Amino acid sequence: MSNPTPVEPAKAAAVEDDAVESIVHLMPLVLPLAGGVLMLLLASIAVYLA
């Protein structure tokens, strides 16, 4: 993944993009947002039950 084999330009369309590599650049944004939403939901459940 980090060192792909060279591809001829004519065959470049046949090479598939890796799904993980297309998403991984969003992780620094998605993980803190998901953690914040999770903490908000858990806090609201705790306040509701108290």
Image (cartoon, rainbow, N blue to C red):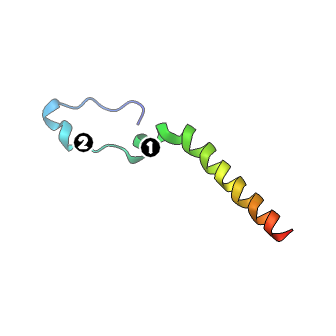
Residue 12 as seen in the image, left or right of residue 32: left
Counting other residues with Cα less than 10 Å from the Cα at mark 2, is it few (<14), some (14-19), or many (20 or more)?
Answer: few
* Residue 28 percent across, percent down from the top left: 56, 37
Q: Earlier in the sequence, mark 2 or mark 1?
A: 2
* Residue 33 percent across, percent down from the top left: 60, 46
Q: Residue at x 20, y 36 (%)?
A: 12
Residue 18 as seen in the image, left or right of residue 11: right
**Helix, strand or loop for disc 2:** loop
Choose top left, top right, bottom left or bottom right for residue 3.
Answer: top left
Along the viewing direction, whichever of 41 and 32 lies nearer the viewer: 41
Q: Hey, what amino acid is under mark 2?
A: Val
Q: Hey, what amino acid is under mark 1?
A: Ile
Whether residue 37 is situated above or below residue 7 in the rendered picture: below
Q: Residue at x 30, y 31 (%)?
A: 5
* Residue 17 percent across, percent down from the top left: 32, 43
**Helix, strand or loop for disc 1:** helix
Report the residue marked by disc 1.
Answer: 23
Along the viewing direction, whichever of 33 and 15 lies nearer the viewer: 33
